[in-house]
């Protein structure tokens, strides 16, 4: 049995998580997967109810389970996901960006961004000295090497090709260290690697996303590029993600809490459903995960889509269509 902590989150979070669990239930039954789901709270509503956005009970449970499925949270996001990443040492953020038949996109896209998740500027080491503000960018050899190993493993399941994105022509020590360590790990792993400066990569991602297969980059660059890739491929509402460490992982959609449509039952649950699929693969159920991806693609292709994509399906109607397709494919 695998133990999964479910954090519904804020806004549309509980709705899209409920939808994902509907699909997950069908997959569990079809593939005889034994998961124990435990619900805990984090986010704005948790802060109101318990006095802190990440209650101690939730944090302790997060340390004990095999995986976490998390909905979006509101203004307290940094107090939840950043703390969880650091506490659980989830050093790799994995973000697929894939366009789907029947869904409008800027360019056809099928790539994965692997982003270092706990270093760089996002350590929050900022200082004010008079009228000068200073932020420290911290890159370590160990941090660069371990995230490069994740990129190598992702690439082995795809084309075996990784593009290292950096700005080492200007940030020669920090970005240079990341680039050099990544080069070394990828070469030792038998991966074909090339490089691109971050500004050129952003331009090329819009112009020709087919140029990329796996992108490996640092925290801040990856944060920006992954949202850009999501929009180029179709929508943030379609984009799942994984925060991965050596023994723990969090899977979550990358869109916000969308308070403006919360409670209306029209939020797009695709990203959360696909995040649950990524979770199943992490837990060792690759075949079941693949069935979820195929079912989502088939439902989107059939024209059953939520209002954000121009359709009329409710959150639960979309989830039920995916669950039905999973059962049919099985």
Image (tube, helix red, strand yellow):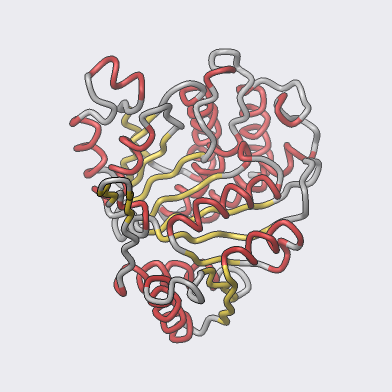
Q: Residue at x 70, y 28 (%)?
A: 308
Query: Left of 25 or right of it: where is 63?
Result: left
Quadrant housing residue 148: bottom left
Considering only vertical position in the picture, is 321 above or below 293? Answer: above
Pick the quarter of the image with the N terminus. top left
Quadrant assignment for the C terminus: top right
Residue 288, horizontal then vertical, whole percent: 54, 49
Q: Residue furthest front?
A: 131
- Figure check: 34 above or below 320: below
Image location (x, y in percent) of residue 58: 25, 32
Q: Could you tell me which residue is drawn at 49 percent across and 33 percent down? A: 25
At x 79% / y 46%, what residue is drawn?
101
Marks counted in the figure total: 0
Check the image and report above or below for 163 versus 190. above
In the rendered image of this protein, does residue 112 appear above or below residue 69? below
**Picture coordinates of residue 74 (x, y %)?**
43, 27
Q: In the image, what residue occupies the spot 59% across and 52% down?
A: 290
How far across and how far down the image is residue 184, in percent?
Answer: 42, 84
Judge by depth and name the residue closer to the eye, 75 or 35: 75
Q: Quadrant of residue 181?
A: bottom left
């Amino acid at each position: 049995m695998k133990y999964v902590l479910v954090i519904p989150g804020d806004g549309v979070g509980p709705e899209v998580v409920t939808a994902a669990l509907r699909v997950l239930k069908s997959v569990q039954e079809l593939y005889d997967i034994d998961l124990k789901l435990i619900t805990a709270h984090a986010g704005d509503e948790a802060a109101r109810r318990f006095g802190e956005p990440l209650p101690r009970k939730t944090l302790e449970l997060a340390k004990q389970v095999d995986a976490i499925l998390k909905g979006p949270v509101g203004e307290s996001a940094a107090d939840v996901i950043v703390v969880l990443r650091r506490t659980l040492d989830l050093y790799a953020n994995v973000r697929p960006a894939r366009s789907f038949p029947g869904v409008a996109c800027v360019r056809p896209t099928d790539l994965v961004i692997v982003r270092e998740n706990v270093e760089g500027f996002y350590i929050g080491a900022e200082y004010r000295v008079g009228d000068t503000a200073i932020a420290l960018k911290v890159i370590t050899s160990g941090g660069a090497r371990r995230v490069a190993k994740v990129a190598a493993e992702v690439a082995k399941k795809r084309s075996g090709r990784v593009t290292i994105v950096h700005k080492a022509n200007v940030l020669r020590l920090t970005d240079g260290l990341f680039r050099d360590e990544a080069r070394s790990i990828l070469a030792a792993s038998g991966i074909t690697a090339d490089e691109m400066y971050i500004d050129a990569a952003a331009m090329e991602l819009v112009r020709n996303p087919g140029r990329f297969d796996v992108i490996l980059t640092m925290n801040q660059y990856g944060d920006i590029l992954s949202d850009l890739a999501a929009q180029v491929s179709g929508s943030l509402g379609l984009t799942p993600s994984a925060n991965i460490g050596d023994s723990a992982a969090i899977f979550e959609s990358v869109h916000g809490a969308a308070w403006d449509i919360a409670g209306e039952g029209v939020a797009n649950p695709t990203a959360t459903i696909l995040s649950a699929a990524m979770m199943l693969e992490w837990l060792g159920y690759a075949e079941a995960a693949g069935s979820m991806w195929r079912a989502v693609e088939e439902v989107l292709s059939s024209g059953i889509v939520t209002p954000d994509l121009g359709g009329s399906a409710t959150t639960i109607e979309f989830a039920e269509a995916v669950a039905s397709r999973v059962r049919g494919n099985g």
